[in-house]
Image (spheres, helix red, strand yellow):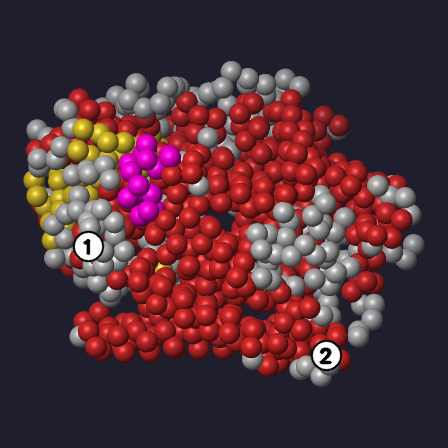
């Protein structure tokens, strides 16, 4: 066998990781947990932008809808309190429906106009979360979102490991689902309208339906990620966790990693979030202990921006691109 | 309009309604100045230049630094006027040069790439600019010295049109008029319009497309530089985040007016200014921003080409 | 063999509570105890939190970084991000998690913002970790019936109290602000808030008292702290002709711009703000000329120059060490640091629960803020408040508010 399946190797390492007993491993482990959750979010966006080529600039809105749906359904202030498992399913569905509601009237818009509508939608959702104080508690965030129950087992959620496996489990589930979809009829239809909508329509693809399904699935996965995020955080995170900035950051995960490819999206998430959440705080602590005032956090934006620019200039298809997109980008130079 | 006026009568009278119109138009013209930069670049290379708002932010930081160096806070009237003109010119030059440099270094090599590639580069440039702003002046809000008198120029106390508001008009109106003349009547202006319509055909007709694009970036940048100075003098607060917030509004203004359309950008800017001021008066302060974006979505669904944009099919 | 492997696995994974309990080291004499603080260290609150951190460091240094046989270490955590410009839920939650996981951490000093405390109290409560806030003033964090329904019990999943504060809460500050306004001759007041836990909370408390004492409340509105300017809002308020605008919020939620835009629309009213704006950054961001003689700031204690005894000694030592006057909350950081040391001293062992219990038992503590005790909710018994104004671009003490 010539090709090593790296993804299985990585998965194996991640499965064994929590066996490390040291304290630093625990701290790193809870960072990894967050990265898994954002990996799901990136995969959701990948369905819309990567597979179907629809520029979606408001994915954070669906992430937020998932988080707040979970919050509303589980926190003690409301009468529902249905617990994690029903809530995570409900949040996924609610976000998916929200995706359909947004997409249905706007799908006839093309290219950048669609991007702008999604951007506007993201802002409206952020302000709605902020302003509908009786439902969302405004800027205060819904708190506390209870940890999941697991078949009545007395799981200790304070320890990062339980949630680590939960998030990893969901991530693997989503990745497998998408890998199967990629090669299905629907997956091929997504890519067909990305490559050439006109030609795809002529070949009998119902473009509106195909786009709608991409939008809905992307939104639903974002909702799932939001639900996990709120549960991991123990609160819904407040309206400012669901801004345009977050949407753009997740888009950058895809672009750095490789648009349209599952492994690429996950690698991008790992590289950028790893830099942001794992590397810079540790570097900062290290130089601070050495007595320096310099903080890597302060130059984060510049580094991030330069990485994007250089990437677009020299490897626009990302680190681990989907084969088809790489071909397209290196097709011909006029 | 009639219903709005009726609402105005019930909630505090016509004077307040007029006052909010003045408020809306002044801030709206600021948005318009920035929006022009978005709309011109989009019109020519179909790029949503995400970094434009942050360019505006850097311009205002430069203006703040220059105001400090020149000691304008304590300068006599004549010195102040001359100093401000100097600050305006320098800030416009700086933003124009920076915008052109970014185009040369970042966007030009990507001209033939798919649309998403330069868009992402623009996001990258935006991050770099924001990071520079953060390193330059820190992350807190900074007071921009109050250099202009806040005197009311109208007789009655019920309605205010201050010297500061007048200054906004004195900068905005001539710039917009000049730009319109430039685009309509000069050779370069014609070349710009030709390039916007069809870059390939324009190139075949002997137009130096790269130069035209450079000029476009220069004009957009210089207007952002002008907006930066006016903003500082009018709002009196600058921060490294202001580019993002105002850029988003300005961009919305450009889309609202019909992206690629110059008068549309101005109209869009003023409409957004009015939505904000009237929304604050009659709907509630906290809903004003949501209102802007909600109207944007509704408008795009029903009239995707914007208020003044022509109904065109996107180039396939 | 199978059972052994399973046992090792589940112990290593710590999935079951029994296994997790076994991880905590047995109490021992000597060793390292860590004190962490979680404050907004990025953004305009930095000047204020710098002095709080300096206060904590001074308290620990004075004790020689030692209590008994324990070496005291300190780590300064940031709960703010540059993009937000102030604290965020995510950072605060991450800080709390980090503190819980570090078995050496025995005391968590923080937070600065009441909203942030809502996030970390329940997390730290489950870990029995003592929390001392130098600056949270939302009453609901400690006082039953004074905050939202369910508070403060929702923050105490174990039923025990782990949260204390050395600053008096807003159920005192808000109403005293209204009374002070009335004393100044104010008749008509418009109330603004930033819609955050602290800002909205104190604005509501101000409003309730203002209505009781027959100040005319013309209206209340929440602002968007990310908005760039408030001229339309101020135009609307101007038409109502208030004598005073009360802004419940902080410097980080645009207090400076509110003050500025009042002037810009020609509104001649006074402005009153709570302690969240009692920092030089407020004057810098608003522009001194916009505040001189017309801004009034209430504060849940005395400004540094009015402190007596140990407090005065602290301020003198601070100036000697750092070369400048401390901000208002420095003394509270110092006090929080000393309370942490006292709790460790009383407990005498490296055990989170013992230190927590010891802290709540502190009575008649002679500190920089005077002589005070923790009451049954973990609140300080101090009630002294001060009213301050801005003169020549500097804060100036006006009077002590309320009795005691």
Q: Residues within 10 Å of mark 1 (few under 14, many from 20)?
A: few
Q: Residue at x 8, y 43 (%)?
A: C398
User: Chain ID for label 2?
Assistant: B
Which label belongs to residue B203? Answer: 2
Q: Position of residue C24 (x, y in %)?
A: 48, 33
Which quarter of the rendering shows the C terminus of chain B? Answer: bottom right
Q: Residue at x 20, y 34 (%)?
A: C189
The region drawn magenta spans: B6-20
Q: How many numbered marks have been drawn onto this rendered protein structure?
A: 2
**Is C226 on the left or on the right of A272, as rendered?**
left
**Is B4 on the left or on the right of A99, as rendered?**
left
Name the chief secondary structure element in magenta.
helix
Check residue A251 for magenta coloring: no
- Give the distance between the C-alpha atoms of the residues marked 1 and 2, in whole angstroms: 56 Å
**Is A190 on the left or on the right of B250, as rendered?**
right
Q: Is residue A199 visible?
A: yes
Of the two numbered discs 1 and 2 in the rendering, the one whose residue sits closer to the viewer = 1
Q: Residue at x 52, y 66 (%)?
A: B37
Check residue B14 for magenta coloring: yes
Are the residues flagged by discs 1 and 2 from a single subunit? Answer: yes
Residue for badge 1: B155
């Amino acid at each position: 066998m010539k090709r090593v399946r790296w993804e299985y190797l990585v998965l194996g390492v991640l499965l064994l990781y929590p066996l490390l007993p040291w304290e630093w491993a625990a701290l790193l482990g809870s960072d990894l947990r967050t990265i898994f959750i954002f990996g799901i979010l990136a995969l959701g966006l990948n369905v819309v932008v990567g597979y179907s080529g629809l520029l979606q600039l408001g994915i954070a809105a669906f992430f937020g809808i998932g988080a707040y749906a979970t919050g509303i359904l589980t926190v003690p202030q409301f009468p529902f309190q249905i617990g994690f498992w029903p809530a995570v399913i409900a949040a996924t569905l609610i976000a998916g429906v929200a995706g359909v509601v947004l997409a249905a009237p706007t799908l006839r818009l093309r290219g950048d106009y669609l991007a702008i509508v999604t951007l506007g939608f993201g802002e409206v959702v952020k302000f709605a979360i902020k302003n509908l104080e009786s439902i969302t508690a405004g800027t205060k965030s819904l708190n506390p979102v209870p940890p999941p129950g697991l078949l009545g087992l007395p799981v200790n959620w304070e320890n990062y490991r339980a949630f680590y496996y939960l998030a990893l489990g969901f991530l693997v589930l989503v990745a497998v689902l998408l890998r199967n979809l990629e090669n299905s009829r629907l997956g091929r239809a997504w890519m067909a309208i990305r490559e050439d909508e006109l030609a795809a329509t002529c070949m009998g693809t119902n473009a509106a339906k195909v786009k709608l399904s991409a939008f809905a699935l992307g939104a639903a996965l974002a909702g799932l990620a939001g639900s996990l995020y709120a549960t991991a955080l123990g609160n819904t995170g407040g309206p400012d966790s669901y801004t345009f900035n977050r949407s753009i950051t997740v888009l950058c995960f895809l672009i750095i990693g490789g648009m349209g490819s599952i492994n690429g999206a996950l690698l991008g998430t790992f590289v950028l979030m790893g830099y942001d959440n794992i590397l810079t705080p540790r570097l900062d602590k290290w130089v601070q202990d050495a007595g320096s005032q310099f903080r890597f956090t302060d130059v984060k934006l510049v580094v991030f921006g330069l990485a994007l620019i250089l990437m677009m200039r020299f490897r626009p298809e990302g680190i681990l691109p989907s084969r088809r997109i790489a071909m397209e980008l290196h097709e011909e130079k006029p | 309009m009639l219903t709005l006026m009726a609402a105005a009568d019930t909630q505090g009278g016509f004077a307040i309604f007029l006052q909010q119109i003045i408020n809306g138009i002044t801030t709206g013209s600021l948005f318009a100045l920035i929006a022009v930069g978005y709309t011109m670049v989009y019109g020519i290379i179909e790029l949503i230049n995400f970094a434009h708002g942050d360019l505006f932010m850097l311009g205002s930081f430069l203006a703040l630094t220059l105001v400090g160096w020149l000691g304008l806070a304590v300068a006599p009237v004549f010195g102040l006027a001359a100093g401000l003109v100097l600050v305006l010119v320098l800030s416009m030059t700086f933003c124009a040069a920076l915008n052109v440099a970014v185009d040369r270094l970042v966007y030009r090599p990507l001209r033939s790439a798919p649309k998403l590639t330069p868009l992402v580069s623009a996001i990258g440039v935006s991050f770099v600019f924001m990071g520079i702003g953060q390193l330059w002046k820190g992350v807190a809000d900074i007071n921009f010295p109050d250099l202009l008198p806040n005197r009311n120029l109208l007789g009655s106390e019920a309605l205010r049109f201050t010297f500061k508001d007048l200054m906004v008009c004195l900068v905005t109106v001539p710039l917009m008029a000049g730009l319109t003349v430039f685009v309509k009547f000069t050779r370069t202006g014609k070349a710009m319009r030709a390039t916007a319509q069809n870059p390939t055909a324009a190139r075949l007709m002997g137009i130096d497309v790269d130069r035209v694009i450079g000029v476009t970036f220069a004009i957009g940048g210089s207007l952002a530089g002008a907006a930066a100075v006016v903003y500082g003098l009018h709002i009196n607060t600058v921060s490294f985040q202001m580019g993002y917030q105002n850029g988003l509004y300005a961009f919305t203004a450009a889309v609202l007016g019909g992206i690629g359309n110059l008068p549309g950008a101005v109209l869009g800017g003023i409409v957004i200014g009015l939505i904000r001021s009237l929304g604050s008066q009659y709907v509630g302060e906290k809903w004003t921003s949501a209102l802007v974006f909600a109207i944007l979505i509704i408008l795009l669904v029903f009239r995707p080409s914007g208020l003044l944009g022509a109904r065109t099919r996107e180039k396939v | 063999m199978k059972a052994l492997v399973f046992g090792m696995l589940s112990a290593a994974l710590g999935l079951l509570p029994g296994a997790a309990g076994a991880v905590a080291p047995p109490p021992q004499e000597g060793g390292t105890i860590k004190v962490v603080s979680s404050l907004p260290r990025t953004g305009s609150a930095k000047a204020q939190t710098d002095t709080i951190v300096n206060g904590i460091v001074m308290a620990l240094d004075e004790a020689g970084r030692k209590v008994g046989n324990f070496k005291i270490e300190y780590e300064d955590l940031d709960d703010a991000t540059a993009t937000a410009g102030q604290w965020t839920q995510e950072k605060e939650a991450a800080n709390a998690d980090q503190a819980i996981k570090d078995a050496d951490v025995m005391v968590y000093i923080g937070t600065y913002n009441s909203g942030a405390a809502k996030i970390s109290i329940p997390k730290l409560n489950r870990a029995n970790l003592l929390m001392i806030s130098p600056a949270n003033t939302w009453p609901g964090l400690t006082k039953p019936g004074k905050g939202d329904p369910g508070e403060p019990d929702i923050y105490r999943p174990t039923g025990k109290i782990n949260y204390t504060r050395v600053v008096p809460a807003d159920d005192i500050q808000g109403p005293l602000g209204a009374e002070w306004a009335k004393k100044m001759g104010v008749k008509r007041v418009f109330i603004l808030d930033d819609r955050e836990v602290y800002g909205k909370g104190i604005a509501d408390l101000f409003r309730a008292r203002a209505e009781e004492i027959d100040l005319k409340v013309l209206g209340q509105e929440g602002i968007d702290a990310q908005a760039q300017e408030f001229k339309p809002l101020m135009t609307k308020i101007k038409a109502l002709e208030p004598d005073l605008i009360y802004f419940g919020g902080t410097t980080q939620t645009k207090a400076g711009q509110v003050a500025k835009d009042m002037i810009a629309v020609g509104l001649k009213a006074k402005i009153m703000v709570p302690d969240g704006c009692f920092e030089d950054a407020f004057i810098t961001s608003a522009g001194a000329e916009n505040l001189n003689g017309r801004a009034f700031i209430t504060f849940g204690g005395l400004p540094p120059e009015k402190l007596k005894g140990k407090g005065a000694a602290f301020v003198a030592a601070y100036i000697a060490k750092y070369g400048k006057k401390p901000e208002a909350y420095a003394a509270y950081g110092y006090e929080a640091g000393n309370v942490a040391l006292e709790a460790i001293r009383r407990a005498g062992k490296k055990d989170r629960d013992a230190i927590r219990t010891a802290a709540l038992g502190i009575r008649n503590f002679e500190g920089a803020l005077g002589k005070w005790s923790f009451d049954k909710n973990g609140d300080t018994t101090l009630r002294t408040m001060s009213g301050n104004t801005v003169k020549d671009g500097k804060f100036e003490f006006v009077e002590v508010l309320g009795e005691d």
